Structure formats: C-alpha cells, structure tokens
Amino acid sequence: MTKDNNNKKDLAVVLVVGKDRSGIVAQISDFLWKEEINIEDISQKIMQDIFVMAMLVDLAGARSDLGVLAPKFDKLGEKIGLSIHIQHHQIFEAMHRV
C-alpha cells in the first residue's frame, strides 16, 4: 500500500496525569474532537488513585497548530484538575533517542 502525501500524519504525544475520577477520557476525547485532532493510539492506567494516560494523536487536520494547542491543553487541564501536556512526536523521539 502506498502512502498518499496528502494523508501525511503530523503526530504528537499527549500526556495526562491526575487524580482518578470518571469522565476523564470523555473530556479529553471531546476536546480533541472539537479541535479536529485524531487519536491514533491510547494507553491509560490507574496507579493507586492516580490516572495516567498517554495518547498518540495526529495533528494533520487540526484546527490549530501546536503553538496554539499547548496553551489550550494547559487551560483545559486547569479547568478539570489534571496535568495535560502535548509534545510533537519528533521532539519526543529526539529526546529519547540513545
């Protein structure tokens, strides 16, 4: 299968940490949907009442670029009592390359 250049992905990593409660995944997913960001992969775990989630998202069709999205994630995190960070996939890979 060949990859069409018009369908090139722009991946980022979203990390979410905070006190566990119901509705976290729904709130984050709703925010991503409204920003037209596609979830490529998701992993979550509850560790002694602490919610931890990592998501790989595609920003290719997003309404805003990463510079605009990062403060929006900060604001959402403050509103719902979670730490939410987004980082471009290339930066994430470069930081963790040995």
Image (cartoon, rainbow, N blue to C red):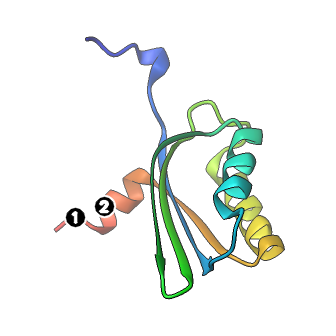
Mark 2 residue type: Ala
Distance from the alpha carbon under mark 1 to that under mark 2: 5 Å
Residue sitting at 67 percent across and 61 percent down? 70
Mark 1 residue type: Arg
Q: Residue furthest left?
A: 98
Report x, y in % for residue 33: 71, 40
Identify the secondary structure beneath mark 1.
Answer: loop
Identify the secondary structure beneath mark 2.
Answer: helix
Q: Are marks 1 and 2 in contact (CB under 8 Å)?
A: yes
Residue 38's disc number:
none
Can you identify the residue that label 1 sits on? 97
Report x, y in % for residue 65: 66, 45
For mark 2, does the 10 Å Cα neighbourhood hold few (<14), some (14 to 19), or many (20 or more) residues?
Answer: few
Quadrant where the C terminus is found in the figure: bottom left
Residue 94's disc number:
2
Quick check: 42 above or below 9?
below
